[in-house]
Image (cartoon, rainbow, N blue to C red):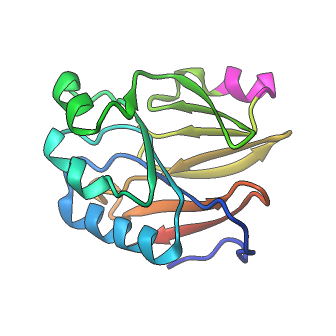
Amino acid sequence: MESRMKMNQSNLLWMIISDSHDNISNAKKFMEIARQRGVTHIYHLGDIVSPFMAPYFLAEEIKFFGIFGNNDGEKLFLMQKFQNTLHNQPYEKEEEGFRIFLMHEPYALLPAIKSQLYDFVFYGHTHQLDIRTEGRTLVINPGESCGYLTGRATAVILRPETREYEVIEI
């Protein structure tokens, strides 16, 4: 595991994950890490792909929120299996006082960043890890959790209060 910043103690702990593309094995591994670390929220940025992935991402102790990606074709069944926690993108959300802008494809990435309306902008689709601060906004693309295109299966754990993060690679 690659550590980007030392983590401090706080109540909120988010896992940002994307592009799982039906990789059950990796979904199980990332969820085990989420449980071990005490993750409170999971943000999935699209391309789950199949409804049968729901049991691997939903956990009673962790709040799940996701958006659809371009490969998520069976939206109605995905919505049913994910208990209406998946949404069309782009999506604006406020969580615990933080303003978040979520998207799969980064079509609105630059306007979202330039607006400086958001504490966090999360996106996926490119399968490339991208973490940077632009003004007041922390931008995160967690890369691909499936590991199919880059050979790296990654997600990001974030403490929103301190903006500290850790890149998790399995």
Q: List x then y, in percent, for residue 108.
A: 59, 21
In the picture, measured across the screen, residue 159 lies left or right of residue 58, that is right
Residue 109 occupies which quadrant of the picture? top right
Viewer-proximal residue, 53 or 126?
53
Q: Is residue 119 magenta?
A: no
Residue furthest right in the image: 135
Q: What quarter of the picture does the C terminus occupy?
A: bottom left
Residue 11 occupies which quadrant of the picture? bottom right
Count of picture labels? 0
What range of the chain is rendered magenta? Answer: 110-117
Q: Magenta region, mostly helix, strand or loop? A: helix
In the picture, measured across the screen, residue 37 lies left or right of residue 132, that is left
User: Which residue appears at 32% of the width and 52% of the height?
Assistant: 58
Q: List x then y, in percent, for residue 45.
A: 44, 40
In the picture, measured across the screen, residue 169 lies left or right of residue 75, that is right
User: Which residue appears at 52% of the width and 64% of the height?
Assistant: 39
Q: List x then y, in percent, for residue 55.
A: 21, 53
User: Which residue appears at 84% of the width and 40% of the height?
Assistant: 136
Residue 76 occupies which quadrant of the picture? top left
Residue furthest front in the image: 60
Q: List x then y, in percent, for residue 38.
A: 52, 71
Viewer-proximal residue, 156 or 84?
84
Viewer-proximal residue, 153 or 83?
83
User: Which residue appears at 73% of the width and 68% of the height?
Assistant: 10
